[in-house]
Every structure is written in C-alpha cells, then in structure tokens.
Amino acid sequence: MSYRPSNARPSNARPLNVRGLGLALLATLTLACVTLAAPTASARELIFAHGATEETAYHLSAARFKALLEEKTDGELTVGLYSNGVLGHETEMFEQQTAGALDFSIVNPGLISEFSHTASIFSIPFLYRDIDHWRHVLDGEAGREIAARIEDETGVKVLAYYGGSTRQIVSTRPLESLDDLQGMKLRTNPTRPTITAWAALGTQPTVMAYKEIYTGLQLGAIDGLLNEAEWIYRMRFHEVAPYIGLSGHDITVRLLTISDDTWNTLSPDEQQAVQAAADESETYARNLQIRLDTESREKLKDEGATFYPMDRERMQAMVAEPLGKVIDEMGLRDVYELIVNTD
C-alpha cells in the first residue's frame, strides 16, 4: 500500500465498551511495567502484538517489519514484539488499538466485523478468481478504498495486506461430489456472508472456538471445517479429518495495522519510514505465506491426506443469489463490484 497521510480519529468512531476499557487499561499497565524496567534511551519503542506462535508466518512477517523499521529510522523507532497472544486475542488487541493502547498488530478481518462492517467484505466466499486477481484487488483501488473505510470506522489504519493462503474444506468423510456436503456440520467463522454461503451449499454452519476443533472432529460435534493447508498441518487436523476438498473458496487476507493515535504522533519522516517498512514486509509476508501453503499441502499428502477436486463453478452458482442479498443488506455492493471488476 502507498503512503497516505491520516487524519485524526473521527468523532463518530465506535465507543470503547467497558470490557474493552479494562483490556486497554491492562495492556497499558503491562507495557508501562516493561518500559519502567528498561534502561532509559532516546529511542522510542512501539509495541507490536499478535496472536500466533513464533514459527508462523504471522511472527516471521512481524519480525521482518520490526527489522526494516529499525533500520530505516537508524534505531530512533524500535519495535517491542509480543507473540502468542500475550496481550490478548486478536479481537481484544484490535480493540486496544482503537483505544490507542497498542501500536501495531496483525488481524484477521473476519474477527473485527463488530468494529468495521466493511471488514466483512473479506469473508465473502469466491471473491477472487485466482491469486493474481487477489493481488490486484489488494494493491489497487479496491484495497485502498477498503483500508480507508476501515480506518474511518475504527480509528485504526491499515498499513499493508498480508496473507495469501488458499482455504479449503477439511472433512471427516470423503468428498466425492458436492452432494457429500449435504448435512455436514461445518465449523465456520460467525460472519453473515460465510454462514449464508455454506448454508446454501447444504452444510450446517457451526460456530466453535478454534482450540476446540480437533476434539470436536474426534467426538463428531463437527464433521469438518474451512482452513488453509499451513494450519491444517500445524494443528494436525488431518489426523482426524483426512479428506480435503479443494474448493479454493477464499484466499486469506491479514491486516497489518497501526492505531491512528500512534500514527498521528509520528513525524512525517517517521510515517514514511513506517509505511515503507510495511510495504517491504508485505512482499515478504505474501511470498512466505504462499510458499508455506504449497509446502504444507505436500506434507499433508505425504502423511496420508486425500485431496478431492471441487466444482467451483457450480458452488459459485449455488451461493450467488443468497450472497447477493446479504451483500446488498450489508451495504457492501459498491466495494464488492470494485473487487469483482478488478482486472
């Protein structure tokens, strides 16, 4: 994404709820303790937190951003990096950013729809024709418009779009045809577009905490889920759900974000350095995620997972009408058209 000066947080931004205030206060106190314990220095430390472990693309991409920013500012801006969700769940960390209590984070847009209805655009299945279309969308007019709307709605600026993994269907039963989706208890994210689309395909969309999925598959509480190859492999889901339908219904998007409260305290030169580091880390993050996706798919095959081709055109036809109604009801038609009409 290109450098764009940001205005202060709009007066109509979503107010922080009581729970969010508590989380923000806790994060502030925690970071204050870290600051007091550190030696006095002229450098300014900014805090970057995310929810993943240190061997994942999330952390490796965050580490690349940290190194780039510190290099570009000659150490005048440093980044304190916190992984493993030590400052909260992704949704909680994003809420801290809306309050100015956290500087940087990486967030799944599907988890922030209560703050930004525009972010729900990324939960619409079959949004991209292929990986090249995905890149053109995020790097073009549509990506810039979405980022601007998210910032207006939340007071959090989107610096870059990470991601690039392709999501598939993971199942405890073979997927010889689309008929095998009928009645499947499918774990999905609780967003309207996702639930609407998979219900139209005959499944029973089911909400379940991510950490409960493996046990849920074992016990039959769910029959499958939607996930990308890297995380199917990392979470060992293929041990209990070895059938993978190549629906390619989504390509992941992850937002690299900065609180507007932080951005507005930076000098113009510092803002340019932050954006330049974000742009360079974006290229690294996407290439890494795509490589991990390919490597993980091979590992899954080696460990006995069975892959099934899926009829994407028929799936798209089945979801078109109900999804269209949801897109209109959510006021996302103009953004959706920007995306689908991107070359």
Image (spheres, helix red, strand yellow):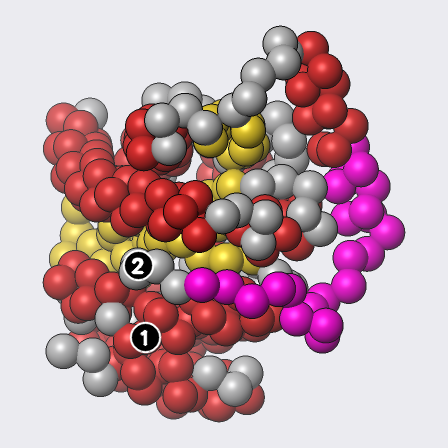
Question: Which of the 4 image quadrants contains residue 291?
Answer: top left
**Mark 2, secondary structure of its residue:** loop
Identify residue for label 2: 1
Quarter of the figure with the C terminus:
bottom left
Q: Is residue 214 left or right of residue 318?
A: right
- Viewer-proximal residue among 149 and 337: 149
Q: Residue 217 in the image: state x and y as whole percent.
A: 47, 39
Amino acid type at circle 2 is Met
Question: Which of the 4 image quadrants contains residue 264?
Answer: bottom right
**Mark 1, secondary structure of its residue:** helix
Amino acid type at circle 1 is Ala
Residue 195 visible to the viewer: no
Q: Residue at x 44, y 52 (%)?
A: 268
Q: Nearer the viewer, mark 2 or mark 1?
A: 2
Q: Residue at x 36, y 43 (%)?
A: 273
- Viewer-proximal residue among 114 and 13: 13
Q: Is residue 113 above or below residue 226?
A: below
CA distance separating discs 2 and 1: 11 Å
Q: Which residues are magenta?
A: 5-26
Between discs 2 and 1, the one toward the N terminus: 2
In the rendered structure, does residue 341 fall within the stretch colored magenta?
Answer: no
Q: Residue at x 67, y 19 (%)?
A: 35
Identify residue for label 1: 142
Quarter of the figure with the N terminus:
bottom left
Residue 148 visible to the viewer: yes
Q: Residue at x 57, y 16 (%)?
A: 41
